[in-house]
Image (tube, rainbow, N blue to C red):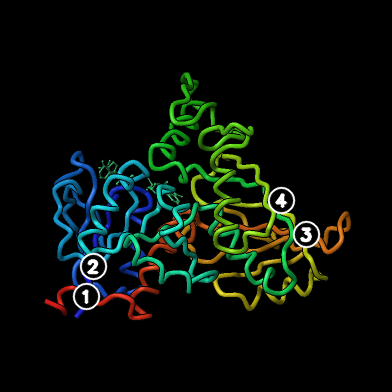
């Protein structure tokens, strides 16, 4: 007997990807339910070769649902996740609402799957920020080998990280430039077409943005609180795929060749690193793929035991929907939940 799964935010960028990935990976679900806001009630979304009628989250009874994959934003999650969890349905949330709560595990299965057991405290598991997910997948095997002391990361984040409205804004602005229409930024603070914006999420008192803070807080929670992390997060006019330029300083010696070999064997990583024209991965090529791609592995001679990397991944997949489904698979494969229907 399989599980009953609800996807909340099913009409959004991440929700639609979740439905595709549940189908692609043959997740053991007997029933999948699509939920969104009242605005979308009655509309349809695809699930494999079927279509699902969207129901309103606020009217849905979670009593017989086993897992809710939640991607409806932080405000909705803050209100609904505790209520859903109280009904015995495990919420795997994509927003930042629960990531820093000591009673909520923050999980990337390749990095800290064992921490998942703490989910029973609130019946909520958090999925990291898209930039952190691909960062820690690449960092974990290197940290295990030579202990990372310090990380300096600059992100080049695609507009899909801002949701479907942000993708539309890039599309409409690009079109407007070609037909000489006026450009009015809406979701972004400045023009995004043919431009880059060094600002994602709100500013904090210390001058960093919340997006930059998330990367350091989440890396420490999942990988090691002793690692020092600093980040500059930048939005770029790419539809899908986040890129990161990463500078690492290690406690112990590690060469570029060693790093390349370690990453070649590491779960979730794919090394594409030929020092020739096109011998690296760009975000466009990562779209629709599951891997975290690592290119441009070089030694940094300006510090002791330093390395530089270029890391790219599909932010809607490993950065969000894929990681969420992988967390659900850990719950199922480790026998941490059983279908409610079986118990009835
Ligand atoms: N995009 C990424 O790379 C990424 C990565 C990691 C995490 N996340 C997080 O995932 C979440 C969703 O992101 P997204 O990119 O998919 O956004 P999106 O494309 O804007 O979709 C938002 C979804 O939430 C639903 N929703 C909004 N208000 C709701 C309400 N009151 N009740 C129920 N459903 C409601 C929307 O339904 P309607 O269509 O009915 O409005 C839609 O399905 C956010 O928390 C985001 O921070 C995104």
Classed neighbour count for the residue bearing mark 4: other residues with Cα under 10 Å, few (<14), some (14–19), many (≥20): some
Q: Secondary structure at mark 3?
A: strand
Residue 152's disc number = 4
Q: Secondary structure at mark 2?
A: loop
> Quick one: quadrant of the C terminus?
bottom left
| 3 or 2: tag closer to the N-terminus | 2
- Residue at figure coordinates x 62%, y 65% from the top left: 138
* Alpha carbons under labels 1 and 2: distance apart: 6 Å
| Residue under pointer 3 | 249
* Alpha carbons under labels 1 and 4: distance apart: 43 Å
Q: Secondary structure at mark 4?
A: strand
| Residue under pointer 2 | 66
Q: Is residue 308 above or below residue 80?
A: below
Would residue 19 be seen by someone viewing this image from the given angle?
no
| Marks 1 and 2 in Cβ contact (< 8 Å) | yes
Where residue 306 sits: x, y (%)? 81, 61
Residue 155's disc number = none
Q: Is residue 224 above or below residue 241?
A: below
Where residue 238 sits: x, y (%)? 54, 44
Viewer-proximal residue among 99 and 160: 99
Quadrant for residue 169, please give it.
top left
- Residue at figure coordinates x 59%, y 70% from the top left: 269
* Alpha carbons under labels 3 and 4: distance apart: 9 Å
Classed neighbour count for the residue bearing mark 3: other residues with Cα under 10 Å, few (<14), some (14–19), many (≥20): many
Viewer-proximal residue among 281 and 250: 250
| Residue at the left extreme of this rendering | 344
> Quick one: quadrant of the N terminus?
bottom left
């Amino acid at each position: 007997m399989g599980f009953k799964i609800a996807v909340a935010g099913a009409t959004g960028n991440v929700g639609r990807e979740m439905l595709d990935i549940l189908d692609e990976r043959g997740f053991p679900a007997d029933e999948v339910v699509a939920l969104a806001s009242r605005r979308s009630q009655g509309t349809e979304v695809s699930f494999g070769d079927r279509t699902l009628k969207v129901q309103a989250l606020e009217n849905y009874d979670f009593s017989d649902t086993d897992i809710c994959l939640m991607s409806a934003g932080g405000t909705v999650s803050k209100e609904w996740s505790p209520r859903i969890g109280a009904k015995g349905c495990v919420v795997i949330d994509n927003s930042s609402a629960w990531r820093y709560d000591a009673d909520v595990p923050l999980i990337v299965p390749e990095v800290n799957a064992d921490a998942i057991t703490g989910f029973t405290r609130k019946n909520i598991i958090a999925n990291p920020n898209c930039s952190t997910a691909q960062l820690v997948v690449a960092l974990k095997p290197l940290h295990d080998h030579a202990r990372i002391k310090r990380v300096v990361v600059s992100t080049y984040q695609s507009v899909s990280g801002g949701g479907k409205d942000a993708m539309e804004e890039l599309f409409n602005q690009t079109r407007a430039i070609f037909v000489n229409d006026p450009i009015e930024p809406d979701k972004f603070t400045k023009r995004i077409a043919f431009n880059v914006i060094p600002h994602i999420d709100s500013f904090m008192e210390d001058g960093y943005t919340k997006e930059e803070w998330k990367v350091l807080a989440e890396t420490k929670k999942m990988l090691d609180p002793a690692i020092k992390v600093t980040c500059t997060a930048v939005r770029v006019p790419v539809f899908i795929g986040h890129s990161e330029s990463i500078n690492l300083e290690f406690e112990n010696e590690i060469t570029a060749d060693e790093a390349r070999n370690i990453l070649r064997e590491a779960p979730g990583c794919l090394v594409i690193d030929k020092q020739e024209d096109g011998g690296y991965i760009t975000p466009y090529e990562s779209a629709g793929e599951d891997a975290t791609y690592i290119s441009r592995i070089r030694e940094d001679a300006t510090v002791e035991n330093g390395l530089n990397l270029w890391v790219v991944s599909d932010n809607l997949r490993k950065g969000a929907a894929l990681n969420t489904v992988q967390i659900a698979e850990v719950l199922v494969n480790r026998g941490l939940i059983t279908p409610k229907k079986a118990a009835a």
